[in-house]
Amino acid sequence: MKKTLTALFAVAALSLTSACGGGGGDRPTQAELKKAITSDDSVFGTKIPEAAADCIAGALEKSDVSDKTLNAIVEGDEDYKGSDKDKDALTGLQSDLTKCATSGS
């Protein structure tokens, strides 16, 4: 569980500074987000455990985080800097992400 919480906070913290970027436009699907956050080369610098990945990806997909930022996560764009609005949206997700990490669903 400690590893899961560490991964969760890595997601939240790193999302605030270097989320993802990219092509913009269409919002990534939950499946695309899950694949990105569970990959060995995730922009978060840590692989999110499978047990929490569906929940975290779903929370991100349904969130107010911009399509551009979510696309950056999917594309692995480590140079992308999210907007202040995205930072606020991610901060607002911390409770949901904590639930994902502790319950795995």
Image (cartoon, helix red, strand yellow):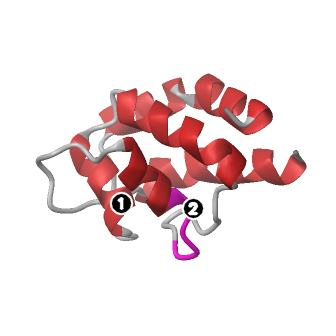
Residue 90 pos. (x, y %):
47, 35
Q: Is residue 20 visible?
A: no
* Displayed quadrant of residue 39: bottom right
Q: Residue at left 48%, top 52%?
A: 34
Q: Is residue 68 magenta?
A: no
Label the magenta part by its dominant secondary structure: loop
Which quadrant is home to the N terminus? top right
Residue 88, placed above or below residue 12? above
Residue 56 pos. (x, y %):
55, 39
Q: Residue at left 44%, top 37%?
A: 60
Residue 105 in the figure: left or right of residue 63: right
Residue 96, placed above or below residue 28? above
Q: Does the residue at mark 2 contact the one at mark 1 (Cβ under 8 Å)?
A: no
Residue marked by disc 1: 74
Residue 30, placed above or below residue 94? below
Report the magenta residues as a range. Answer: 37-41
Residue 15 pos. (x, y %):
48, 50
Q: Is residue 38 magenta?
A: yes
Mark 2 or mark 1: whose residue is earlier in sequence: 2
Residue 28 in the figure: left or right of residue 13: left
Residue 77 pos. (x, y %):
34, 69
Marks 2 and 1, how far apart at CA: 11 Å
Amino acid type, callout 1: Val
Residue marked by disc 2: 38
Looking at this rendering, what residue extends furthest in the right direction?
Answer: 2
Q: Residue at left 33%, top 27%?
A: 64
Q: Residue at left 71%, top 46%?
A: 51
Amino acid type, callout 2: Thr
